[in-house]
Amino acid sequence: LIGLSAATLLLFNGDILGASGLMSSLFVVAPKKTLTEPSQQWKLAFLAAFCLTTRVYVTMIDPDALKDERLGYSSGLPIVSPLGFILGGFCVGFGTRLGNGCTTGHGICGMARLSIRSCVGVLAFMATGILSATGCSPTCPFHAHLRDSYESVANHLPTESTITIGTIIASLAAGVALPGLLHKAPHQNVTKIDMDEHDNNKRKIIPAIFSAAFFSLGLAISQMTISSKIYGFLNVKGLKDGTWDPTLACVMGGGLIVSFLSYQYVKGFNAFKNSNALECPLSQKLSVGHFNVPTNKVIDNKLIIGEAIFGLGWGMAGLCPGPAMFLACAGYPNVLLRWWPSFFIGSFLAEKLKSFSVKMVSPSNK
């Protein structure tokens, strides 16, 4: 389902599934542009559909979807402390913004189009994710600060107030996305290109809604929203004692295969000859429609350092942006009140650092 989510967004809209990029653009990089420009309305529809699907799933379909059964018998599972959530969220926000991607953008989408840049990014965050999760053992000097006791588990679960906050977030997202669905066509004295662009912007909304629903359901069904599944894979000590969990590898592998197949129908990104490859996304008019697939091939310090920092945060708190979106909507207090605020602060600082570095290398500063 996660691969299908990426494929839907790509083939119908020509856009890339990237959870970190979506959240950063909405709240850090260009919030005004995302909220007001018609070409960005699909992002609001995606967020609204994701939040609403999550609320429906955990409320009506499977209330036990986020229950971690391993807590009952595996005392070695980490319970992330409040500080761990704060530092983890900050590192993920800073790293994904600096490196321009996370497990979905670089992993599911980038590797599927055989991007060397994305492959390097994935290697970087996988390496530091494994290092962070494996190294944060009871013998680690930071263990007492980054991990909590089993007695604190009850404090990590949703409360009535945080569930209400999650419901409000879903409702607000739906309300903000509604104008995109109701956006009127331009006045009559406009060019055909303007009308086609308007139509294309509206046509992106329905595929975005389906993509978001697939993404939310995929995360829940695959249990990628349960941090012990992430920790069980990243903690390679489990290979020795028989507790290593390959679920993450299977989920990413399955999503990668589906995403790879979708790229075989995008002209210029297909690895095999395909006479049916598309020059324009399926929902778009050919006159103005195009694929927004990244073509950056530069492997630089920002990519490697950014993704390495992301990996540290991922292994520290067991969360990347997609599952964190799900848990926030489900009302998990540490994700809502600690991880996400720290993510946005980290993303903001990384964006400022990127802007500063661009100014430093501009011709006027040479």
Image: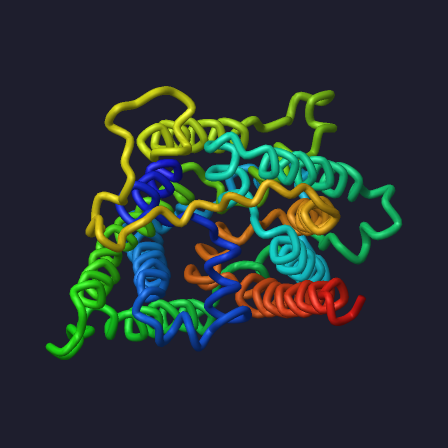
Q: Quadrant of the C terminus?
A: bottom right
* Left or right of 115, for residue 183: left
Which residue is pictured at 26% across the width and 49% down the height?
210
Q: Relative to 70, say whether 175 is above or below.
A: below
- Res. 320 in view: yes
| Count of numbered circles on the image | 0
Which residue is pictured at 62% across the width and 32% down the height?
233
Q: Quadrant of residue 71?
A: top right
Between 91 and 156, the residue placed more toward the observer is 91
Between 215 and 20, the residue placed more toward the observer is 20
Q: Quadrant of residue 135?
A: top right
Q: Position of residue 57 (x, y in %)?
A: 31, 52
Which residue is pictured at 34% across the width and 20% down the height?
273
Q: Position of residue 306 (x, y in %)?
A: 69, 51
- Res. 150 in view: no
Which residue is pictured at 64% across the width and 66% down the height?
351
